[in-house]
Amino acid sequence: MRPVPVVVHLTGLCLAVTTVVALELGAAAPSPGEVTLPGPATGGATAGGPTTGSGPTTGSAPARESEPRPAGVRVADLPPGPEFPRHGTGTWRVVPGGIGTTGVQYSVEVEEGVTVPQGDDSFAAVVDFALAHPRGWSRVQRFRRVAAGGEPELRVRLTSQDTARRLCGVELPYDTSCRIGDSVYLSAARWFRGAHAYGGELRAYRTYLVNHEVGHFLGHGHVPCPADGAPAPVMMQQTLSTANDELAAITAGVDQGVVITADGKACTANPWP
C-alpha cells in the first residue's frame, strides 16, 4: 500500500485473457460489457471473507460502506472475518498455468505456508481477471502470465501477514500491501478480510488490491480523492479510506509519496483505473 524505497507500478491484460479466465472457471465467456469477477471461496470460516452474494459479480463496488462500523472501529482497521494466514516461510511457489501471448510477463505466486481455501488457482484467477479486464490497466498495457521456469518481469505474490508487515513496513499501524522491485506483495490479511471502505464487497476489493499495486509497478504514485462523491482513483489508498480527511489524519507524518489535504472530499470505492 505504501510506497517503498523502490518504484511501484502495473498494467492490465487483453480481453482475450479475460475470456480464458472465464473459461477456466467453467463459465461461458462474457461479452466485453459483461465480464464478471470470479467469486470468493465458500464453505466455512476460512472461505476467504465477507461477500454480498454467492455467485460471480461485476467488479463494481458499493457507493459507500454498506454497513456502519461498530463504535471504536477505525476505517483503516482490518474488518472482522475468517482466519487468514499469519505466518509463511518467505519463499513463494509459482501457480501453474499461463495466459496471454504478448505484454509484460508476470507470474502468480503464493507464499509457502499460506493455504488458499479454494486452491492457488482461485487466487490466480482474480489476478488474471484484473489484469485482463478492459476497464483495467489493459487499456494501456498488456500482460502475459508465465508458469514456473518462465522469465517474469512482474511477480504478484500472496503473502502472509507477518511477511507482508516485514517487507512493506509498519510505519502505519495497519495491514497493507506493497510493491518492491519487480514483485507485488499482497497482504493475505487484506485478501481474506478486505477493507471497510468496500463495505464487505471482497471480490471488488481484491480487484482493487491487484490494480493498485500493479499501478505502482507501472510507475503511478498515490493520489487523493479529486472531487466529493466521485469514484476513487485506483491509486488512492482505498485500503485505508476513501475520504481525504481520514487519509490526511492516518498518513500524517508518514511519507506516502503525496501529502493528503483534509479538504472534506470523500470518494466512493472503485477498483478500476
Image (tube, rainbow, N blue to C red):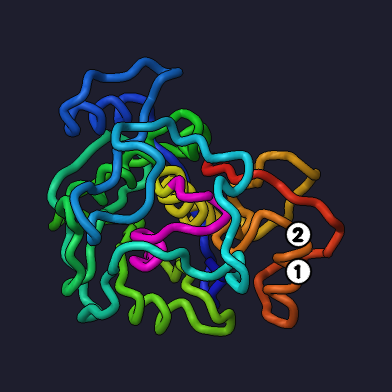
Check disc 1 and report the residue beneath it: 248
Location of residue 144 in the rendering, given as x and y in whole percent from the top left corner: 30, 41
Location of residue 259 in the rendering, given as x and y in whole percent from the top left corner: 77, 68
Q: Residue at x 83, y 64 (%)?
A: 261
Q: Residue at x 52, y 43 (%)?
A: 271
| Circle count | 2
Can the viewer see residue 147 in this picture?
Answer: no
Of helix, strand and loop, which one carries label 2? Answer: helix
Q: Residue at x 65, y 46 (%)?
A: 232
Can you tell which mark lies on residue 44? none
- For residue 206, above or below residue 78: above
Label pair 2/1, CB-CB below 8 angstroms: yes
Location of residue 25 in the rendering, given as x and y in whole percent from the top left corner: 19, 33
Q: Residue at x 31, y 25 (%)?
A: 16
Can the viewer see residue 171 in this picture?
Answer: yes
Nearest the camera: 244 or 159? 244
Residue that lies at the very extreme toward the front in this rendered image: 71
Check disc 2 and report the residue beneath it: 244
**Is residue 52 toward the left or the right of residue 46 in the image?**
right
- For residue 210, above or below residue 128: below
Residue range corresponding to the magenta coloring = 182-201
